[in-house]
Amino acid sequence: MGIFDFLKGVGLGPKLNPGQEAQEIKDEINRQIPGQIDGLNVSYAEDHTVKLFGAAQTQAAREKAVLIAGNHDGVTRVDDQLTISATTMAQQVAAAQAAAPAEFYTIQKGDSLSKIAGAKYGDVHAWKELYEANKEVIGDNPDKIFPGQQIRIPAR
């Protein structure tokens, strides 16, 4: 997918522990989207860049891994080197059809999921769709989004 920039100091959860950043991010990705990234490998550089390697089961899992990594406090950039795995021809065709990347959106002051859904989909009631697409990033409460946080806006 490429390189994605994030705002330093606006991430979720506690600060990453020095020297353990890569492992903590890897553990969080595996906790939030278990079994969806095969061979996940994470590196963390002094410039606060995270590199992700492995094979995602789906495009959505790939995007979620990028957002989970990038929304950590202290991460300013994610270099996505993930691929999408597909083992059979039917899976390859389905993966290609489902691989339309989602738009990444940075939460602004005053935003709500319904406001974003209205602007992006023309339907404020589609907030539930946005929440389901970002549950791993947002957490258990759809009202707990904050300025600077990034979410996915899946193509419809």
Image (tube, helix red, strand yellow):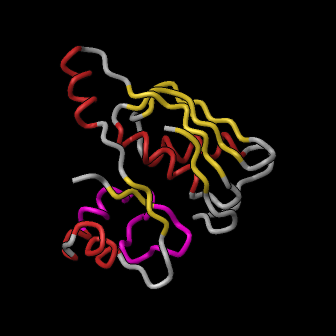
Residue 28 picture location, percent across and down: 54, 47
Residue 52 placement, left or right of 102? right
> Where 29 falls versus 128 (above or below)?
above
Residue 9 picture location, percent across and down: 69, 67
> Where 32 falls versus 113 (above or below)?
above
Instruction: Confirm whether the magenta stretch covers residue 139.
Output: yes
Residue 128 picture location, percent across and down: 24, 67
Residue 151 placement, left or right of 22? left
Q: Quarter of the image holding residue 117?
A: bottom left
Label tally: 0
Q: Residue at x 48, y 38 (%)?
A: 1
Q: Residue at x 67, y 54 (%)?
A: 75
Between 40 and 83, which is closer to the camera in this rendering? 83
Q: Quarter of the image holding residue 143?
A: bottom left
Residue 119 placement, left or right of 19? left
Between 15 and 61, which is closer to the camera in this rendering? 61
Q: Residue at x 46, y 73 (%)?
A: 145
Query: Most extreme residue toward the top, as rendered?
Result: 88
Q: Which residues are magenta?
A: 128-150
Residue 46 picture location, percent across and down: 81, 45
Instruction: Confirm whether the magenta stretch covers residue 53.
Output: no
